[in-house]
Image: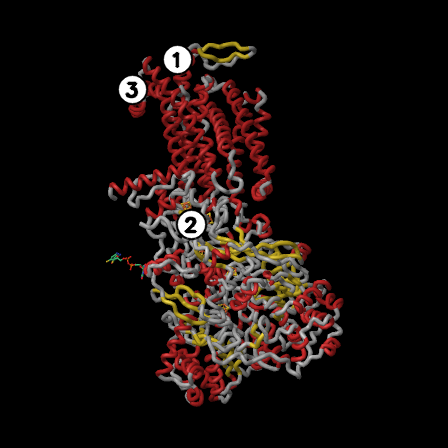
Amino acid sequence: MKRRTFLQLSGMTAAGALLAGCQSKNEKLIPYLIGPDEGVTPGRATYYASSCAFCPAGCGILVRESEGRAKKIEGNPDHPVNRGRLCARGQAVLQELYHPDRLQQPLKRSGARGSGEFTRITWAEGLGLLTAKLKELQQEHSTDGLALLTPQLSGSLATLVTAFMRSFGSSRHVSYELLAPDWLRLADRQTFGQAGLPFYDLAETRYLLSFGADFVENHLSPVQYGNAFGRMRQGRDTVRGHFTYIGGRMSLTCASADRWMPARPGSEGALALGMARLILEEKLHDKSALAANGLRPEELLGRLKPYDLPRVADMTGLAKESIAEVAREFAGTGPSLALAGESVAFQSNGPESVRAIQLLNMLAGSLNRPGGIYPAAAPSGPDNSFTQLMALIESMQAGRIKLALIKGDPVHAIPPATGFQQALDKVPFCVSFATLLDDSALQADLILPDHAALESWGDVEPLAGSRRPLYGLMQPVVMPLHDTRQFGDVLLAAASQLGGAPAAALPQKSWLEFLKGTVAKRVSGKMGEKFEARWVDLLRRGGQFESNRGPDNVYRRASASSLPDPARPRFAGDETQYPLHLQVYPSSAFTDGRGAPFPWLQQLPDPMSCVVWDSWIEINPVTAAGLGISQGDLVEVASPRGSLRLPAVIYPGIRPDLVAIPLGQGHKGGGRYARERGVNPLALLVLVEGSEHQPAWNATRVRLTRVSKSGELVTAGHPQGSYRSDLIGI
Amino acid sequence: MSDKRIPVSKSDTLMNDEMLSSLRPPGLAWYALIAFLGAVVAWGLFAFGYQITRGMYVTGLDRPVMWGLYIVNFVFWVGLSHSGTMVSAILRLSQANWRRPILRAAEAMTVFSISVAGLFPLIHLGRNWVFFYLIPYPNQRGLWPNFRSPLLWDAMAITTYIIGSVLFLYLGMLPDLAVVRDRSSGWRHALFRLLALGWRGTAHEWTVYHKASTLMAALIIPVAVSVHSIVAWDFAVTVVPGWHSTIFPPYFVIGAILSGVAAVITLMIIIRRAFHLEEYLTPLHFDNMGKLLLVISLLWSYAYFVEVQTTWYAHEPIEWEVFSFMSGRYTVPLLVMLLGNSLLPITALCFKRVRRSIGAMLVITLLVNVGMLIERFLIIVPSLSHKNMPFVWGSYRPSWVELSITAAAFAGFALLYAFFVKLFPMVALSDVRELEARSVSVPLGRAELPSIAGKE
Amino acid sequence: MEKLTSPYKWGMVIDLDRCTGCGACVVACQAENNVAICDKKEIAEGRNMHWLRIERFWVGEYPDVRVRFLPVMCQHCHDAPCEPVCPVYASYHNPDGLNGQVYNRCVGTRYCGNNCPYAVRVFNFYQHEWPKPLENQLSPDITVRPRGVMEKCSFCIQRIRRVKETAKGEGRLIRDGEVQPACAQTCPAEALTFGNMADPESRAARLARSPRGFQLLEQLGTHPSVIYLKGGGREHVG
Ligand SMILES: Nc1nc2c(c(=O)[nH]1)N[C@H]1C(S)=C(S)[C@@H](COP(=O)(O)OP(=O)(O)OC[C@H]3O[C@@H](n4cnc5c(=O)[nH]c(N)nc54)[C@H](O)[C@@H]3O)O[C@H]1N2
Ligand code: SF4
Ligand code: SF4
Ligand code: SF4
Ligand code: SF4
Ligand code: SF4
């Protein structure tokens, strides 16, 4: 250092020290002395547009990449579904790519099923094994002995899978997901006579009435609706949208509501009809809308006779006054919007309740209007994949399935009450296409590991994301890390090795070629040089987001549609023996369990319970006190089907006769972060009698017993401090 | 009143012998003590090594309780260090003659406890290996430490205090070192010859010596006061509820003197017993020290009451929250603290019989320091546990590492002391002898007060 | 030598009426800033490393019960209690009004952590590891902090710097909305608005003037750069 500099510095330091008491001088001193903000070297990064395939919402993403590695996932601002925003899960998908326990090459089972003992094989061996099994089926003329179980697919992969199964000669492709909105498609079909899902114009509504639709965390398109909710609240200058939530458990979505109506489980449909009756009685309904839907108020009122206010109040356990008040507000504050959600749908009377809620939208004139409800341009999906699943399970039980191909983790995410897990044992050969050794892969005889999403090609049609058709593309943003192959490529390779009909139906050399073919069909019809330019452009932007085709589709009540009649709900388990209702709900981080392997999500405190790295059961404080249970105690939950032990969370936002357990934990596999962590509440669920073909996952009753005080519960918030917002004045 | 300050019947040589008895070759007991203390210190060093190699997670610290037992120790040991220099300087300046036999023990205690105290901020650093960033030295990056930080003030104050109290101790010891020099042989003789700086005991030397002692005593008092005020500023200048309190500096100083005086008494009792100095440390000394302790305990109680009272009266929600949490979660320690620092000394020390009972004084003074240790804990930990943001409230429990290092601090302190007594004259020989030369007894009412004939 | 004055005073507006408590911002921050992965034990010990947390408060009793969410990151106080107490200037104020943190300088006294009334400073009690190949996700733009040092939200200073350099290259000031910290960028509900408070026309500055605006622990006089907008409604229950 030069002497001058030294003197300068000494001078400044002395001045700094002298003036220290009265003035903040170091802000001048420090930048002079140390150059850039410490350790900050903004480097050059590249962004690749792609799509999030973690959940069916299919948000658009931009992946930041530097030095050949994916660094961060951000929302694609041009994507109409998520407008540059992302949920916690979408960002954690990065950890799928770099998960330390990823499957790195094909594996063949060497120990007993479920033992986790596998030997490494090459892709040639793996594919050979798969084709050999397929050929066996062909030789035995029992191609229907092939079953394919996948999540609900969209886009080109759905096309490929259908083509493969058809050309092979098997009808047993079941695309089942625990949380798939089949129930909503069914309700749409029954009420409006058209397949599909609704698009809610939540941002523009003034009165939002959610019957258990948890659009902030999971319902249909959470980022889109989370964003719309923000705009509904504070996006307009003069209007702040009102939000009332109905449901026995205060969900994350409900936590943002202005009013909470903790209706008795299964009574939501009756509540909707009670409100409908009151609206009609008081002539608050939209007359022209009713006429347009072919409904006569008097006739309707006559049909709604049984749903008088005192009876509905009695059924729901809510105050008459508040029911009437909400009904009047809903009808009187246009535009208003009523949403039906999973906790309603997964009751024994779910489908009817959902339709009852749709009726409210009709009465308020909310169909096809801004701030109301429109048909979404979503791809159609199955109305009841559960029936298909049950049929498949029956075939498996009967030994008719010889070869099962499994994409996804059904062993974890299908309730054992269906008998799926036992039935799988009867299938002589199972192939998994997992990326981690998940619960299903543990049961497989052959694992042909898929690429991680960020290494994959693909396309995504966002679920219920828009009124106009749109689709997103997925492109690899890094070179594949391991010796893995994409599911599509494996199917194409198998088809080609099989020869015959499959090879003829699927002549494409690679999944990319197949994908480009389907995309070409969409955009221009032909592949070729012109398309290549278009393709590059689509990849750069992340998909096709505008469409010339307007949203021509509208909702109109089908004339054949009957009026909904939500009967008294049925529950599994005797009330005296099992005094409490059990609600299982998708964790906001893990949904049905697919998020559990990612440490960022495990570490993310659950927004409502603040629990990290675990499962828990939510109990009303009064109920808990009655049972001698305090926060963090280990409790045993017993249902007619089984019992589980997990820590208790004292939860002021739940009905005293209801307890709730989040889904998503309790994996046997799934890598180091998910394995043997928490419990899977699906084990408790019972198929309610008379509802065997209707997934009534919230209709099981349970009993609680305190086991000990060591539930090993870890929460991010201080248990007492969490009640002391008075100290910070918020 | 028949207390004698010095056994005049004894010969000079005998008295010198007795007062220097601690310098006799150590016995088995001493070696056993050293071995034990050494083992504890070694264990503490191991614990510290463990902490350095593993990380701060081996402590019980967390968010929001980022300071724990180490800082408790720091404040406690700084407090203890007020014993000696401060007490001895005050007594020296106020010419209280009964002080003479205890000076040395007290001053040595200051040096050792402030040294132990000074270690704790370093032990507690997340990156001890770069502790030199705290030191103002010209460096290549041209970056100085932040003089606005009370930690820097601490560093300065403590360094000054260490230097000052070492000088103070040394200065007081100078004539004694000469005595020991003349009575020793071998390496000791060489050492003491060096240390005695050629002291011959001429009148001129004595005059200069007295001037220097008085000056040093006058200088060291403000330093001592400032040291604990500054330690109090570590807390008072923050915005932590329960810390942000204007009374902290005087309150800390009073607490420090309380703990220091109590520690001196405890030490007197131990030394008296260990080196058979019953005739030099008489009940009179304990009586006087007891009175001092009583006064300081009253002061402390007043300060504590004022602190709690203002919290209660203002009823600032978060301050009150901290106080309620502290009294609810730490009820037993709180009561022990109040008993040890306030109730017990105030009631018991009113009685002369108690003040003159060595056993009672031992119990009381030990309890005072237990109370003071608890007090430091109750100031630091509960305030941090329930800071401003209720969602991140927390708790703290010291880990074995922190407990080991604390134990090692006590052992290390004792170890230093054990070496010191074997090496240096424990009783301020020349001070005592000087008094003998001048002392007369002045009857005052019923009491016979020690006085001196001439001015010091 | 950097300029001593700056045309920027960065600030954040958090609309509690929009915030749904979803936690997307928490993961975004963790991803952007190489924030350590903390296992269950570590969090049980009170040593979570998140730079941004969503505080959740229960108010009232069933059925008259509500939840309030409060996202809390470093408030970048203009009179930051964490700054004067740091003996080594590891916690300092930069000309843009940010509270900066120099990891290399920090000796780990944790004094700043005590004196931050918002409890947003997190200390590296552990030496954090990213099991291979998870370390590939680490951003090269910022350091991975070693054990023994304090860290906290930086308002994504690397993003600010990047845009600053671009703007400087083009000889202009940073445009409103050009810098987006990771949390604000991802927030589905658009509850977080970041911007230059020195520009009265920036979106953040305009929002900050809302009558719903307030600052956390205002009474302490820390003058935070984060302005909260009160959540409304929630008066009916039943
Ligand atoms: N052990 C060892 N040490 C050596 C040498 C050796 O051979 N062995 N070689 C010596 C020699 S010859 C040299 S030149 C030096 C090189 O030493 P460095 O200058 O340290 O070079 P790199 O190690 O390449 O690291 C440069 C950093 O810049 C980042 N970076 C990459 N691209 C960009 C960009 O576009 N913008 C910005 N801002 N940052 C970017 C990278 O992520 C990386 O962190 O090392 C010297 N030291
Ligand atoms: S909502 Fe679904 S698709 Fe969108 S980011 Fe989240 S996980 Fe991905
Ligand atoms: S992302 Fe937005 S809405 Fe979600 S918790 Fe954070 S601030 Fe709130
Ligand atoms: S919030 Fe805390 S860490 Fe941030 S500037 Fe303020 S005092 Fe410092
Ligand atoms: S922990 Fe680091 S930043 Fe905080 S006061 Fe200590 S040295 Fe400064
Ligand atoms: S501004 Fe950046 S560092 Fe701060 S909380 Fe948001 S994402 Fe984290």
Residue A230, given in percent of the width and then of the height, sits at 54, 63
- Disc 3 residue type (three-letter): Gly
- Which chain hosts label 1? B
Label 1 secondary element? helix
Marks 3 and 1: CB-CB under 8 Å? no
Which of marks 1 and 3 precedes in the sequence?
1
Give the foreground label among 2 and 3: 2
Amino acid type assigned to the residue bearing label 1 in the image: Asp
Q: Residues within 10 Å of mark 3 (few under 14, many from 20)?
A: some
Could you say which disc has been placed on residue B198 in the image? Answer: 3
Label 2 CB sits under 8 Å from any ligand 4 atom: yes
Q: Circle 3 sits in a helix, a strand or a loop, which is it? A: loop
Quarter in which the C terminus of chain C is drawn: bottom right
Residue for point 44% across, 88% down: A505
Mark drawn on residue B12: 1
Q: Are marks 1 and 2 in contact (CB under 8 Å)?
A: no
- How is the model colour-coded? secondary structure
Q: Amino acid at mark 2?
A: Asn
* Number of the front mark, 3 or 1: 3
Quadrant in which residue B109 is drawn: top left
The location of residue B382, given as percent across then percent down, is 54, 42
Instruction: Measure the C-alpha gap from mark 3 to mark 1.
Output: 22 Å
Q: Does ligand 5 reach within 8 Å of label 3's beta carbon?
A: no
Look at the numbered disc 2 and give the secondary structure of its residue.
strand
Residue B32 appears in the figure: no
Q: CA distance from mark 2 to mark 3?
A: 59 Å
From what the image shows, is residue B317 above or below residue C38? above
Give whichever of A515, B188 is nearer the camera.
A515
Compared to A531, does A56 lie above or below?
above
| Residue identifier under label 2 | C99
